[in-house]
Amino acid sequence: MTEGTVRASSRASSRSGRSRRKKKNQIPIAIVIFLVIAGIGVWLGLKQDTLLLYWLIGLAFGFTLQRSRFCFTASMRDPYLTKSTSITRAVLIAFAITSIAFTAIKYGYFINGLAIPGQGYVVPISIATAIGACMFGIGMVIAGGCASGTLMRIGEGFWMQVISLFFFIVGSLWGAHDFGWWKRTFMLKAPKVFLPDHLGWLGGLAANLLIIAVLYVIAHKWEKKNSDELSH
């Protein structure tokens, strides 16, 4: 047996030995984390009931995001990079469900003569919207995640995402500082579009769902086309 063969066999044996080693038991760590989470929940509940509710909702959202790998960045990025649109279609389905729910809530307030909630978020459509969308899109692709994805990955232990979070905060503060100029220069002169004002409540919802359905079909056909090309 040659010296090279012996070395290769030794390296293979070493790797095999490492693979047979038992993984570190993480159950004690999980118990400690659970007790910390429970302790924070009890502390918040004693201060105010709604704080405990927010804590539980936040935990549920984090768990759902981590297990589903749901990410808005991936929904926009994957069709170009991997040709997969599964997350894109999941996001569109989520948009459809929330569109129906929000319309029902807003319409309930409307028919009872109450102030419609959330109208402050009906903002003008201007060049500022396009510039902001491009900047955010480029940033979240470079960072590898949007706000929710960044927070989720930090929780998983991807500490490089802390850098993304830091500059996310810096960018938000910078944007807040300059918001007045953008508002005076572009936003105050731009129109606001609230579909029920133009198409009625049912028409506005139908138009919204139609746009989502068209995008869903396009996404499905895009993935099918590329998968067919790869299979041939």
Image (cartoon, rainbow, N blue to C red):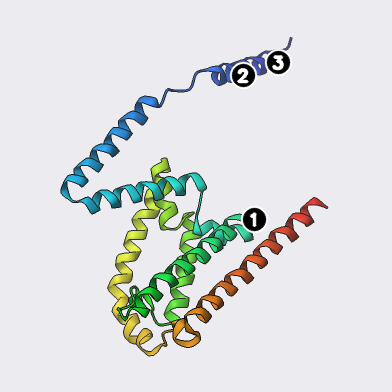
Q: Residue furthest right?
A: 232
Q: In x, y percent, where is residue 129?
A: 44, 77
Q: Amino acid at mark 2?
A: Arg
Q: Amino acid at mark 1?
A: Ser
Q: Residues within 10 Å of mark 3 (few under 14, many from 20)?
A: few
**Is 156 on the left-hand or right-hand side of 112?**
right
Q: Which residue in the structure is indicated by mark 3?
A: 5
Is 69 located above or below residue 14 in the figure?
A: below
Q: In x, y percent, where is residue 31?
A: 33, 29
Is 209 located above or below residue 27 in the figure?
A: below
**Mark 2 or mark 3: which comes first in sequence?**
3
Task: Provide the secondary structure element on which disc 1 rests.
Answer: loop
Q: Which residue in the structure is indicated by mark 2?
A: 11
Q: Residue at x 63, y 60 (%)?
A: 79
Q: Nearer the viewer, residue 25 or 21?
A: 25
Q: Amino acid at mark 3?
A: Thr
Q: Residue furthest top?
A: 1
Q: Is residue 161 visible?
A: no
State the mark number for residue 201. Answer: none
Q: Residue at x 22, y 51 (%)?
A: 49
Real-space CA distance between mark 1 and mark 3, rounded to the nearest whole angstrom: 44 Å
